[in-house]
Image (cartoon, rainbow, N blue to C red):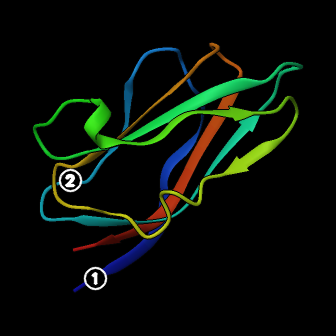
Amino acid sequence: MTVVAKALVDPLQLTTSDVTQYTAAGSTRAIIDKMTVTNTTGAAATVTVNLVKAAGAVSASNTIISAQSVAAGTSYVCPEVVGHILNPGDFISAKAGTATALTFRVSGREVS
């Protein structure tokens, strides 16, 4: 068994559409250690995050964070996702309520 600590999602600006940000590949499982959302604007913005099973689709049943408000100029460290495991093919989807307002980053471990 090999464990690699890494950025699962390098910093990026979220859009207002549900976008797959990370998928656990092949025979890899991923453990989420930290997820941070930073609001780089002057107004509050919301973030929604889904952890979706392989071959699944974003839906209310896999929403982990729903329209969480992030105040202007602040960061939200997402305790809801810490420790969650993504099996092969499972993925993280995220979107913002306001385009280009939120920077998103995820760190974790890949186990193969």
Q: Earlier in the sequence, mark 1 or mark 2?
A: 1
Q: Which residue is mark 2?
A: 25
Residue 2 has which mark? 1
Residue 87 sits above or below residue 54 on the image = below
Residue at 56% across, 25% down: 14
Q: CA distance from mark 1 to mark 2?
A: 14 Å
Q: Position of residue 44 (x, y in %)?
A: 79, 24
**Picture quadrant of residue 63:** top left
Left or right of 45? Residue 78 is left
**Picture quadrant of residue 41:** top right
Left or right of 11? Residue 48 is left
Residue 96 sits above or below residue 79 on the image = above
**Picture quadrant of residue 52:** top left
Residue 28 has which mark? none
Q: Position of residue 83 (x, y in %)?
A: 43, 70
Q: Tag 2: Cα neighbours inside 10 Å, few (<14), some, or many (≥20)?
A: some
- Label 1 close to label 2 by CB (< 8 Å): no
Residue at 43% across, 15% down: 17
Q: Tag 1: Cα neighbours inside 10 Å, few (<14), some, or many (≥20)?
A: few
Name the secondary structure under disc 2. Answer: loop
Residue type at mark 1? Thr
Quadrant of the image containing the N terminus: bottom left
